[in-house]
Amino acid sequence: EVRGGWNEGKDRDTFLSKLKKVEELRFLEKPDRSLGQSALQFVLSNPHVTTVIPGAKNRLQAEQNAVGFGTLSSEEIKRINSLD
């Protein structure tokens, strides 16, 4: 089974490492901005990117993705780039 070993051995270590990285990005969440919206803003903060095509699993995610918003601040970008 594909999902059988995700929580054991090396796969568990990989999962926990990625989870730690997500937790380090929680500073991007604001009352009016989800972590998903922050991810879209991060992509849009790249001057070579003009649009993003986000996916959504449900109506709420689609509505959150449709909200008009800008880019991350230069301080937020610096903090993200300083993470391991």
Image (cartoon, rainbow, N blue to C red):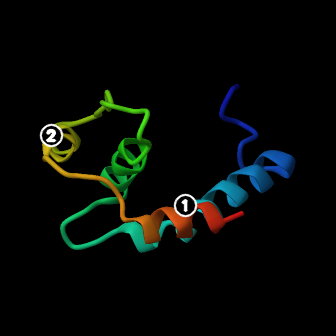
On the image, numbered disc 1 is attached to which residue?
22
Answer above or below: position of 17 versus 50: below
Secondary structure beneath dot 2 equals helix
Residue 33 appears left or right of 1: left
Q: Nearer the viewer, mark 1 or mark 2?
A: 2
Mark 1 or 2, nearer chain start: 1
- State which quarter of the image contains the N terminus: top right
Give the image location of residue 75, x and y in percent.
Answer: 45, 71
Which of the numbered marks, if any, corresponds to residue 66? Answer: 2
Task: Report the residue that reaches farthest toward the right.
Answer: 9
Residue appearing at x 37%, y 58% in the figure: 35
Give the image location of residue 6, x and y in percent.
Answer: 71, 43
Q: Identity of the amino acid at label 1?
A: Val
Residue appearing at x 13%, y 47% in the figure: 67
Disc 1 from disc 2: Cα separation: 23 Å
Give the image location of residue 52, x and y in percent.
Answer: 33, 31
Residue 14 appears left or right of 28: right
Which of the 4 image quarters holds residue 60? top left
Answer above or below: position of 39 versus 83: above
Q: Residues within 10 Å of mark 1 (few under 14, many from 20)?
A: few
Residue 44 appears left or right of 82: left
Task: Report the residue that reaches farthest toward the front.
Answer: 47
Q: Identity of the amino acid at label 2?
A: Ala
Secondary structure beneath dot 1 equals helix
